[in-house]
Image (spheres, rainbow, N blue to C red):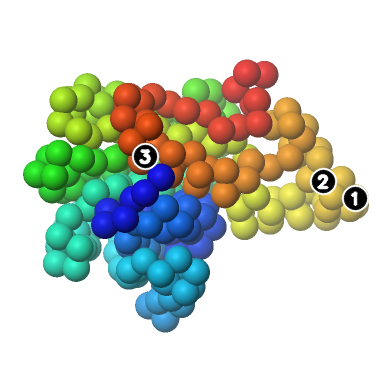
């Protein structure tokens, strides 16, 4: 999977799942744009680590995806540095936990902007450069909740489902341009937010964290373990490879069998 010379923007990638995806793409030779809202020194530290590990060019760009003007400025910075965005991974996410009747308007608007509208704006701004090079990869980080509902998470379920529609629309529109568009749908990953929820379960029930973790996973991934971030990164790297040229418009689960259950 030689991606040497390609530029990959992964949103929400200064840590966690996004960073794992960036690491996989850098390992395949791609130049990387890390994105987030962390202080510049933290983002630059993460970028330096990728450079040290893989030797590719890596920069960090801070941008608030709720603001279209900041999205446009970020893309301008990237094009000035790398000419074009060849690989776009829309990974950044904002989520809230609340019953619908208590859901705050500003939280709804923020989630729509970051989870859905930012993916649209980054796609529309990246596609001209991809078309000029007759090659491009757009990956939307969807979710198991793109295919099923859950309570108290209306913003997350709605926006992740919307990404599937965007994936299909772009795949069909771009089918003869050398650009593919796919959605990757992870199950439960050991993110900081989920680890905190598991610790809360352990505290509330007075059980060990390991026991709370198994209880949490029992209703989710049938494998009984978290989905590995590195596995998600490897899947995305494959979707960027020549072997995946005919995979477009797909929503691909990587969920330990959760959807099958």
In this orientation, which residue lies closer to the viewer: 13 or 51? 51
Image quadrant of residue 144?
top right
Per the image, label 3 sits on a secondary structure element best described as loop
Classify residue 255 as left or right of residue 112.
right
Image quadrant of residue 64?
bottom left
Q: Which label sits on residue 207?
A: 1
Q: Residue at x 30, y 47 (%)?
A: 88
Question: Which residue position is annotated with label 2?
Answer: 212
Quadrant of image for the N terminus: top left
Going by the picture, which residue comes out furthest to the top? Answer: 260
Per the image, label 1 sits on a secondary structure element best described as loop
Q: Which label sits on residue 3?
A: none
- Front position among marks 3 and 2: 3
In this orientation, which residue lies closer to the viewer: 48 or 56? 56
Question: Which residue position is annotated with label 3?
Answer: 241
Q: Position of residue 186 (x, y in %)?
A: 54, 37
Q: Position of residue 240 (x, y in %)?
A: 36, 41
Q: Position of residue 232 (x, y in %)?
A: 53, 43
């Amino acid at each position: 999977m030689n991606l040497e010379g390609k530029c990959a923007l992964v949103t929400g990638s200064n840590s966690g799942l996004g960073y794992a995806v960036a690491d996989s793409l850098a390992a395949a030779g791609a130049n990387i744009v890390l994105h987030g809202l962390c202080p510049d020194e933290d983002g630059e530290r993460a970028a330096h680590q990728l450079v040290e590990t893989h030797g590719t060019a890596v920069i960090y760009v801070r941008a608030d995806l709720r603001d279209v003007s900041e999205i446009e400025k970020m893309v301008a910075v990237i094009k000035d540095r790398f000419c074009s965005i060849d690989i776009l991974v829309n990974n950044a996410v904002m989520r809230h936990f609340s019953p619908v009747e208590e859901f705050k308007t500003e939280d709804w608007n923020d989630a729509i902007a970051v989870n859905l509208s930012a993916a649209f704006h980054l796609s529309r701004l990246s596609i001209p450069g991809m078309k000029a090079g007759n090659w491009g990869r757009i990956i939307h980080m969807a979710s198991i909740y793109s295919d099923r509902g859950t309570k108290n998470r209306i913003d997350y379920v709605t926006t992740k489902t919307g990404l599937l529609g965007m994936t299909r629309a772009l795949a069909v529109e771009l089918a003869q341009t050398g650009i593919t568009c796919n959605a990757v749908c992870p199950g439960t990953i050991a993110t900081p937010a989920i680890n905190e929820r598991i610790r809360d379960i352990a505290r509330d029930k007075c059980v060990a964290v390991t026991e709370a973790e198994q209880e949490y996973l029992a209703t989710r991934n049938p494998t009984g373990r978290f989905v590995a971030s590195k596995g998600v990164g490897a899947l995305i790297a494959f979707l960027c490879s020549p072997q995946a040229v005919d995979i477009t418009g797909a929503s691909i689960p990587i969920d330990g069998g959760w959807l099958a259950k």
